[in-house]
Image (spheres, rainbow, N blue to C red):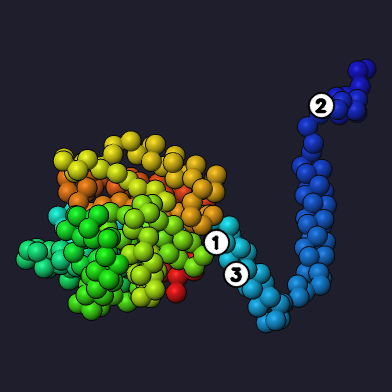
Amino acid sequence: MNPSPAADGDPAKPLSFSSYSFLTAVFLLTLASCTERTDRKEPVPVPDSAAIKGQEKKAKDSVAALSRKKKKIYLTFDDGPNKGTRNVLGVIEEEKVPASFFIVGIHTTDTRQQEETWKMLQTDSTIELCNHSYSHAHNHYTSYYEKPGTIVTDFNYSNGKLGFRNKIARTPGRNAWRIGAIDHTDIYDSKAAVDSLYAAGYDVMGWDIEWTFDHKTLAPDADTALLLRRVYNLLEAKKTRTADHLVFLAHDQAFQKPEYVEELRYVVQQLKNNPEYELMLATQYPGIR
Ligand SMILES: [Zn+2]
């Protein structure tokens, strides 16, 4: 007789119900023993408050070290209040970035609208207002810088009238610097006048890069990619007045039309979102008194 299929030891034969029960029991026992082992595990030590504080300090230090490594960019806007100032302020507020506005005293009372803009600038706590003279030399720079006394009187007048909270000055029509050890005058004939401003207690801040504009159409230079590349190159080559710090100059009057405002927003966003940069206020520049 042929042997019965049950006795031939066929490996393909399906397991009987009792075999399943046995395997299930073994599995459950194994699982139980594992769980038991987990339960018996030593309790995880709870760090004491000193250890927590130590870890917090480490985290803070590394954030501070990261911030120290970042290159600092100072957004500065000249000549307001004028027809572009509210647009610039709008971008600065919407993008939530620090910026410094260098104010021309006479522009705060030129028109009703400029008076209102001046009030708006004063109520914004995230920006900084600095002195760009009272008269802006009435745009006659040569004669303005010939008499050192005149420039001090002009800046003092604006300071007294507008009540700036810092003594940072930017000379009209001249890229001049007097901050700490930085002593630079772009046009030598202005040297004595700028010296007198510094001696009168003003820190004179020029700029490392200017976003130029067409003085007839007031359109800002459209090549924003080139502008941003120049920012990068100046910092990389350490060709700014202070290494790793860059003062960026733009002019309010160049941002009157919506398309130019969007160009400004693009540039601000690119600088803000670059992890290698940190935007700062003028009073945070190294050496400011
Ligand atoms: Zn100016």
Q: Residue at x 47, y 49 (%)?
A: 274
Label whose residue precedes the other's in the sequence (1 or 3): 3
User: Residue 12 got which mark?
Assistant: 2
Q: Amino acid at mark 1?
A: Ser
Q: Amino acid at mark 2?
A: Ala
Label whose residue precedes the other's in the sequence (1 or 2): 2
Q: Looking at the image, which is closer to me, 179 or 246?
A: 179
Quadrant (top left/top right/bottom left/bottom right) for the N terminus = top right
Q: Quadrant of residue 122?
A: bottom left
**SS assignment at label 1:** helix
Q: Is residue 10 above or below residue 260?
A: above
Task: Note whether ligand 1 is within 8 Å of mark 2.
Answer: no
Quadrant (top left/top right/bottom left/bottom right) for the C terminus = bottom left
Q: Is residue 204 left or right of residue 152?
A: right
Q: Which mark is nearer the camera, 3 or 2?
A: 3
Residue 282 appears in the figure: no
Q: Is residue 281 above or below residue 19?
A: below
Q: Amino acid at mark 3?
A: Lys
User: Residue 274 got which mark?
Assistant: none
Q: Residue at x 34, y 69 (%)?
A: 197
Q: Residue at x 58, y 57 (%)?
A: 69
Q: Is residue 113 left or right of residue 153?
A: left
As measured in the structure, the alpha-carbon distance from the residue carrying label 3 to the one carrying label 2 is 65 Å
Residue 213: image location, x then y, percent: 25, 43
User: Residue 67 got which mark?
Assistant: 1
Mark 3: few, some, or many residues within 10 Å (few <14, many ≥20)?
few
Residue at mark 3: 60
Residue 154: image location, x then y, percent: 23, 70
